[in-house]
Image: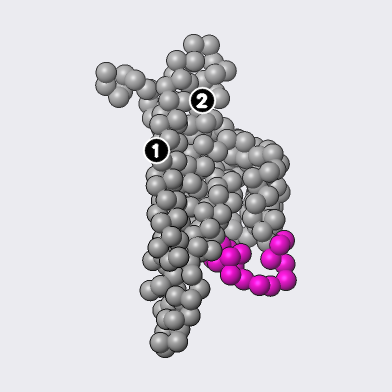
Amino acid sequence: MTGEGWLGPAEWQAIALSFKVALVATLCSLPVGLGVALLLARGRFWGRGLLNLLVHLPLVMPPVVTGYLLILGFGRRGPLGTMFEEVFGLVFAFRWTGAALAAAVMGFPLMVRAIRLAVEAVDPGLEEAASTLGAGRLRVFGTVTLPLILPGVLAGAVLGFAKGLGEFGATVTFVSNIPGQTRTVPLAIDTLLDMPGGEPLALKLALVSIAVAAAALALSEWLARRVRGARGGQA
């Protein structure tokens, strides 16, 4: 059976958009996630508990609430949305960029947690030894810390990417369900389930989602084992 016969153009478009949204969300949030994970793992400062709370809040809040907050902040009339449009010409409301923002926000806690666990597994003595040999902070990070936490960074990126592929509630609340613009795979499945005779296509898209999610989880688990192995090697 050919790919064109298995899914229609609209479904392939939704798959392509989902990968685009998830990839952009992951690439844009990964540097921030790395910095926040380092702060939470190593930092000792006032407000650390509040930062940890804010990072993980999207995990426990209803996604529709997260989407509503994104409307307030990044909508066309929101303060951040107005700033991004005036300064960078970037519009989030009812655009795929807004879907990427929603995916980044929802996947951020998973990304930070995976990276933070990797950072906490690093023996600080290794970094201190490099410092005593004259290496500066950036060099210590680049030559000692980053190679050791790289499996955790990759695991965080994979989890964030997988979450971005499956994001629904915040996305549909923030940027609606617009074919070709914001209709990712989860939104396409929801649309097909509301259409007469749409269930077979919805099932096929669901199978695609399950396969991608399973592959992402398997990769994340393999990377997590690498982190645990690194921890055991330092013991």
Q: Is residue 71 left or right of residue 35?
A: right
Q: Quadrant of residue 99?
A: top right
Residue 91 in view (yes/no): no
Q: Quadrant of residue 232?
A: bottom left
**Label located before the other in sequence (2 or 1):** 2
Report the residue marked by disc 2: 189
- Residue at x-position 51% and y-position 25%: 189
Residue 196 in view (yes/no): yes
**Crowding at mark 1 (Cα within 10 Å: few <14, some 14-19, many 20+):** some
Q: Secondary structure at mark 2?
A: helix
- Residue at x-position 69% and y-position 39%: 62
Q: How many marks?
A: 2
Farthest left residue in view: 2
Q: Which residues are magenta?
A: 35-50
Indicate which disc residue 215 carries: 1
Quadrant of the snapshot with the C terminus: bottom left
